[in-house]
Amino acid sequence: MKKAIFIAYAWGSTALFAGLIYWLATISYLDAGDEVTGELVKIIFRMSMYAILFILLYRSIILTLKTSVRRLSQWRSKREQMEDTEFVLIIETLVVIISVLATTLFSVFEEYTQFITGGYRNAEVKDVLISIIAVLLTALVVYTVPVIGELEIAIKNKLSSEFRSFKKKK
C-alpha cells in the first residue's frame, strides 16, 4: 500500500507538471517585453519547463522500478552489487532513452495541438527543437550524475523505519 502511494505521488507530480505545460501552451499570447527579450525569455522558459518534465518523468520511472524490483533497490551482498552493476547501468540507460523519447513526443504533440487549435501565432519547429535540446542536455546531466530519486527513496525508507518503530512502541 505504501509503495503504491509513493508511486502514485511520483507519477502524479509528473502528470500535473505535464498538464501545466500543456495548459500554458493553450494560452494564445504571452508577452514578455520587446521582441528580443520576449523571445529570449520564452526560450529559457521553454527549456526550463522541458528539463523539469524530463527529470520528473525519469524520476517516476526510476522510482517505480526501484520500489518494484527488490534487486534494483538493495543488494544483499557485495558480490551481488558487483554482478548487478552492469544490469543497473543498462536499466538506467534504457530509462534515459525512454524519457528522452517520451518528452520529445510530448513536445511535438503540444506544438501540434497549438497548430490545430489555431489560437497560436503558428506552430514553429524552432520550439520543438528548443525542447529537444533542453531534454538532451538534461539527459546528459542526469545520466552522468545518477542521484535523481535517491533522496526521495532515502526519505521514504527513513519514514518507513520511523513509522515501524513508532508502531512497535504502541
Image: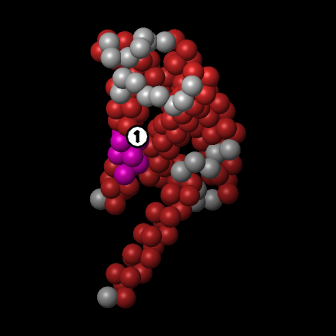
Q: In the rendered image, which quarter is residue 3 located in?
A: bottom left
Q: Determine the residue positioned at 32% across, 12% down.
A: 118
Q: Which of 82 and 33 is in front in this view?
A: 33
Residue extent of the magenta highlight? 9-17
Judge from the rendering whether residue 4 lies leftward or rightward of residue 75; answer left or right.
Answer: left
Taking 120 as reference, is 16 above or below it?
A: below
**How are the colours assigned in the image?**
secondary structure
Q: Nearer the viewer, residue 122 or 61?
A: 122
Residue located farthest toward the bottom when viewing the structure as drawn: 169
Main SS of residues in magenta: helix
Taking 32 as reference, is 124 above or below it?
A: above
Q: Quadrant of the N terminus?
A: bottom left
Q: Which of 130 and 41 is in front in this view?
A: 41
Does residue 98 show up? Answer: no
Q: In which quarter of the image is the C terminus?
A: bottom left
Q: Is residue 32 magenta-colored?
A: no
The mark tally for this picture is: 1
Q: Is mark 1 on a helix, strand or loop?
A: helix
Q: Determine the residue positioned at 65% across, 30% down.
A: 137
Q: Determine the residue positioned at 50% across, 35% down.
A: 49
Q: Which of 13 and 148 is in front in this view?
A: 13
Judge from the rendering whether residue 60 lies leftward or rightward of residue 3; answer left or right.
Answer: right
Does residue 110 show up? Answer: yes
Q: Mark 1 — residue?
A: 17
